[in-house]
């Protein structure tokens, strides 16, 4: 049986956005936009970076030049709530999967090198999981040690 990389990527992105949804819903609304110190980022800002990164990766896979992302982006106020962020993460993951297409071996070239579409798109899931760990840590700072992924 051949390994279906498109299905694997689809499942990985879907699972990752599902975990994000559970953790974003676990935050009180005011916690999503609070920065816990000088130079800190809010959970909404971190989630928004994931949305923008997914969109940039999708653009590159479509052969477009991605928009510039200088520094760490702030989440637009109208998107700084769990419902909007969950929708944006899901839509940006869908955009990424659509841009990947069926040919997972196709080469993508970017300023730092080149790699297969699968490897390039899989970075998005890894990037989202990395930042989800930060969201989990922020939850503990608010006194919430629960693993919300189970629910």
Image: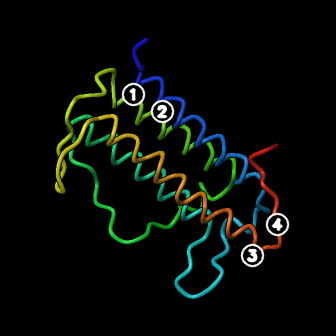
Q: Residues within 10 Å of mark 2 (few under 14, many from 20)?
A: some
- Quarter holding the N terminus is top left
Above or below, 145 relative to 58: below
Image point (34%, 48%), residue name = 56
Is the C-beta separation of discs 1 and 2 under 8 Å? yes
**Whole-number angstrom distance, CA of label 3 to CA of label 1:** 37 Å
Q: Which residue is mark 3?
A: 141
Q: Which residue is mark 1?
A: 98
Q: Please, what secondary structure does the residue beneath circle 2 have?
A: helix
Q: Choose between 76 and 35: the one closer to the eye.
A: 35
Rendered location of residue 73, percent (x, y)? 44, 66
Image point (49%, 29%), residue name = 10
- Quarter holding the C terminus is top right
Image point (73%, 47%), residue name = 22
Rendered location of residue 137, percent (x, y)? 67, 68
Q: Residues within 10 Å of mark 4 (few under 14, many from 20)?
A: some
Look at the image and name its color scheme.
rainbow
**Whole-number angstrom distance, CA of label 4 to CA of label 3:** 7 Å
Is the C-beta separation of discs 3 and 1 under 8 Å? no
């Amino acid at each position: 049986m051949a390994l279906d990389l498109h299905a694997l990527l689809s499942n990985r992105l879907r699972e990752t956005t599902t975990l994000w949804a559970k953790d974003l819903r676990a935050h009180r609304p005011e916690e999503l936009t609070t920065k816990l110190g000088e130079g800190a980022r809010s959970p909404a800002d971190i989630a928004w970076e994931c949305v923008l990164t997914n969109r940039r990766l999708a653009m590159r896979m479509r052969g477009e030049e991605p928009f510039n992302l200088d520094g760490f982006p702030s989440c637009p106020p109208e998107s700084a709530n769990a419902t909007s962020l969950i929708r944006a993460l899901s839509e940006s993951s869908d955009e990424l999967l659509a841009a990947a297409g069926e040919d997972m071996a196709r080469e993508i070239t970017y300023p730092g090198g080149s790699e297969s579409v699968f490897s390039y798109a899989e970075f998005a899931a890894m990037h989202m999981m990395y930042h989800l760990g930060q969201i989990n840590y922020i939850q503990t700072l608010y006194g919430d040690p629960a693993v919300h992924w189970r629910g």
